[in-house]
Image: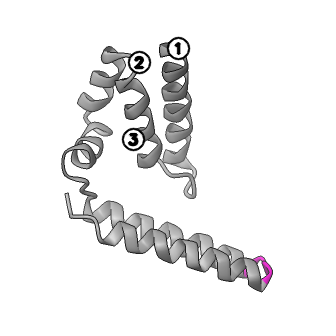
Amino acid sequence: MRLLWVVGGLISMAIGIMGIVLPLLPTVPLFLLAAFCFARSSERLHNWLLSHPKFGPPIGDWQSTGAISRRGKQLATLSVGLAFGLSVALGVANYILIIQGIVLTAVLIFLWTRPNA
């Protein structure tokens, strides 16, 4: 079972790293998932991720208080707006836009109701 958790963590990290350069791919949630997987499989990888100078602080903030940085919230809001705008520009069907709008609004409500890191 530990092997499955390690593989899940490594896949999450790989996709999260791709999210650094691909604007619509979420980075921090995938790193949170990787931390979750590593906590169940590899203390060494878990500690490495939490002590990483770039990725560790947002994960630590989330694990300790459920907090998200204001900058992170702003970037996520911008990404949500761009994703929805792209759907509108591509002429996606109205019923899909309505569903997407409801889901993205729920995501933003959740995001902005979290404490600031």
Residues in magenta, as a range = 89-93
What residue sits right under mark 2 in the picture?
Answer: 41
Name which of mark 2 and mark 3 comes first in the sequence: 3
Disc number at residue 33?
none
**Element at badge 2?**
loop
Q: Nearer the viewer, residue 61 or 77?
A: 61
**Element at badge 3?**
helix
The structure residue drawn at horizontal position 70% and vertical position 75%, both measured from the top left corner, is 87
What distance separates the C-alpha of mark 1 from that of mark 2?
A: 7 Å
What distance separates the C-alpha of mark 1 from that of mark 3?
A: 18 Å
Q: Is residue 63 above or below residue 101?
A: above
- Is there any visible trace of residue 74 in the rendered image? no
Q: Amino acid at mark 1?
A: Leu
Q: Nearer the viewer, mark 1 or mark 3?
A: 1
Q: How is the image coloured?
A: one colour
Q: Amino acid at mark 3?
A: Leu
Q: Is residue 37 above or below residue 63?
A: above
What residue sits right under mark 3 in the picture?
Answer: 32
What residue sits right under mark 1 in the picture?
Answer: 3
The structure residue drawn at horizontal position 19% and vertical position 57%, both measured from the top left corner, is 117
